[in-house]
Amino acid sequence: MKQHIYVYSPSSAVRDKAAIRRGVARLKSLGHEVELDEAALASHMRFAGDDETRLAAIHRAAASGADVALITRGGYGLTRILPGINYKAVAKAIRGGTKFVGLSDFTAFQCAVLAKSGETTWAGPALGEDLGVEGEPDDIMLDCFEDLVTGRGEGAGWRLPAAEAIEQPLNLKGQLWGGNLAMLSSLVGTPWLPDVPNGILFIEDVSEHPYRVERMLTQLLYAGVLKRQRAILVGHFTNYKSYPHDRGFKLKTVLDWLRAQVKAPVLTNLPFGHVPTKVSLPVGAQVNLAVQGRDAFVLWGHQH
């Protein structure tokens, strides 16, 4: 099914232009129409153009009528322009059928859209690092993205570690939200962090040592965010370096601490983050979380 995909750059400047070319070619080879925003390859300091340029790109994406608005990459830059986004225009585009897709720094946009309009966006791949990789992209990522693009996606499943196997089947309903932990913690106390009681929160991050992960989680804990969640789904935390003076302090230490702070189940191995294998998740949608033994599923039915 041919879909119109609009590609734009709301955060950091594209450094690997070859990856963007490969990503565009790959999407076209899948039968999609790809439209590259006029400022997709713009550069200003570390950003993909100055603040006004990137705001204009977001608004062009919203006005494009595309089936999917896909970011080139994450990085940094969205938090500084959140007040300038026309959320009514974005919400109108979403209600008209445009799915805004991305991850990492894009979490700030997703949280702000949810806080301001209640509309659903999608946590999923970026064009460069995921669809534009050299060689073949990850099959699961590609299948999940294609399901998202064509509106066929109804859920995602994964295997929990053996130590997390659940004896009694778990079945919870709640609003799925979250994304990059650094972005989530940076929005605490601002109008851009949505209030999600009975939420199902998912988190991931990259290049953050476990002690930094714990520090960001304490921010969410002390702000009262974590106690309002029905479940916490932990994706991948990658690309950090351990030190001798950690003396055994590692990510498992943080997760054990987290489980002692909250009543909600904390489930790991969610296939999402700065990793090749990632599912696509509807941020803001009502979902069912079902767990039996080591098999976990997030189910949302059709989300348009």
Image (tube, rainbow, N blue to C red):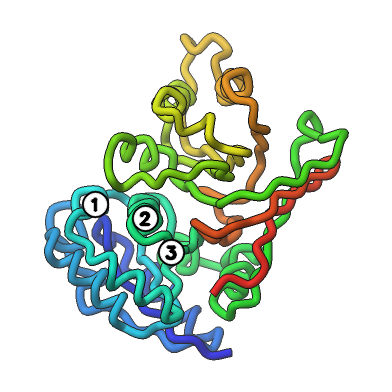
Look at the numbered disc 3 and give the secondary structure of its residue.
loop
Disc 3 marks a residue whose amino acid type is Glu
**Rendering coords of residue 37 (x, y %):** 27, 78
- Residue at (49, 86) in percent of width and height: 3
Counting residues from the start of the chain, the first of labels 2 and 3 encountered is: 2
- Residue at (46, 33) in percent of width and height: 225
Between 204 and 200, the one nearer to me in the picture: 200
Q: Is residue 246 above or below residue 69?
A: above
Between 280 and 171, the one nearer to me in the picture: 171
Which image quarter: residue 1? Answer: bottom right
- Residue at (55, 59) in percent of width and height: 285
- Neighbor class of circle 3 (other Cα within 10 Å; few <14, some 14-19, many 20+) is many
Left of 100 or right of it: where is 12?
Answer: left
Look at the numbered disc 1 and give the secondary structure of its residue.
loop
Q: Mark 2 points at which residue?
A: 106
Q: Which of marks 3 and 1 is in front?
A: 3
**Rendering coords of residue 129 (x, y %):** 44, 60
Counting residues from the start of the chain, the first of labels 3 and 1 encountered is: 1
Between 95 and 298, the one nearer to me in the picture: 95
Q: Name the residue under label 3.
A: 119
Disc 1 marks a residue whose amino acid type is Gly
Q: Name the residue under label 1.
A: 77
Q: In this view, does 68 lie above or below 100?
A: below
Q: Distance between the residues labelled 1 and 2?
A: 9 Å
- Residue at (27, 49) in percent of width and height: 76
Q: How many labels does the image show?
A: 3
Disc 2 marks a residue whose amino acid type is Phe
**Rendering coords of residue 303 (x, y %):** 58, 70
Q: Is residue 271 above or below residue 10?
A: above
Left of 78 or right of it: where is 302?
Answer: right
Which image quarter: residue 21? Answer: bottom left
